[in-house]
Amino acid sequence: MAEISQLLGAMISYYKGDPRRIHHFLKVHDLARTIGMLEGLDKDTLFVLEAAAVVHDIGIHWCELNYGRCDGKLQETEGPPLCRNMMEALGFEERVIERVCWLVAHHHTYESIESVEHRILVEADTLVNLYEDGVSHEVIQHSYDTLFTTETGRFFCRKMLLEQ
């Protein structure tokens, strides 16, 4: 069975020469994994979450090259086929690939979040984006109030971004 470390290596190769994007998915992966563990996810759900966190932005370069932009909805459309190709080449199980592709296709969809791995992926990506984008305290507070629902995600947002 394929391992998360193989996927990390493949994504680092995929994003070669773009350390900003590599650091982004590494941070999202680490936060998602940590939130998932502290929220008590079972081993299989945690594995899917980790894989999705690694590849969540796989569509960015493709979108930039083919459309000249990489907004979230475009990433959600173009990312899953790229994700599938990479994960199949590495030997991931089909059930894992299917779920990870679904998460990649919804990682910028913030309404109707029904699964814990979707929730945690969105929270981890948002934590990193809020920091990297240097947004105002008001934007962070709004995100905290409207987006974060896991106990761990809310704690991390408070400690990392809201409390001085």
Image: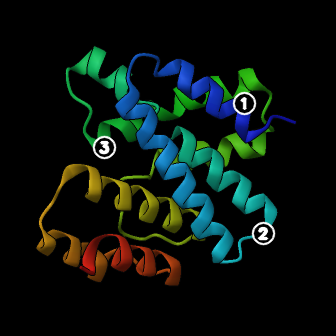
Mark 1 vs mark 3, CA separation in Å: 27 Å
Mark 2 vs mark 1, CA separation in Å: 21 Å
Label 1 close to label 3 by CB (< 8 Å)? no
Colour scheme used in the picture? Answer: rainbow
Pointer 1 or 3: first along the chain:
1
Q: Residue at x 21, y 28 (%)?
A: 69
Q: Residues within 10 Å of mark 1 (few under 14, many from 20)?
A: few
Mark 3 vs mark 2, CA separation in Å: 29 Å
Where is residue 24 drawn, in percent x and y? 41, 42
User: Which kind of residue does numbered mark 1 sit on?
Assistant: Gln
Tell me if residue 44 comes above or below residue 88 in the rendering: below
Q: Residue at x 20, y 77 (%)?
A: 142
User: Which kind of residue does numbered mark 2 sit on?
Assistant: Asp
- Label 1 sits on a secondary structure element that is helix
Q: Residue at x 40, y 27 (%)?
A: 19
Tell me if residue 117 comes above or below residue 102 in the rendering: below
- Label 2 sits on a secondary structure element that is loop
To which residue does mark 2 refer?
A: 42
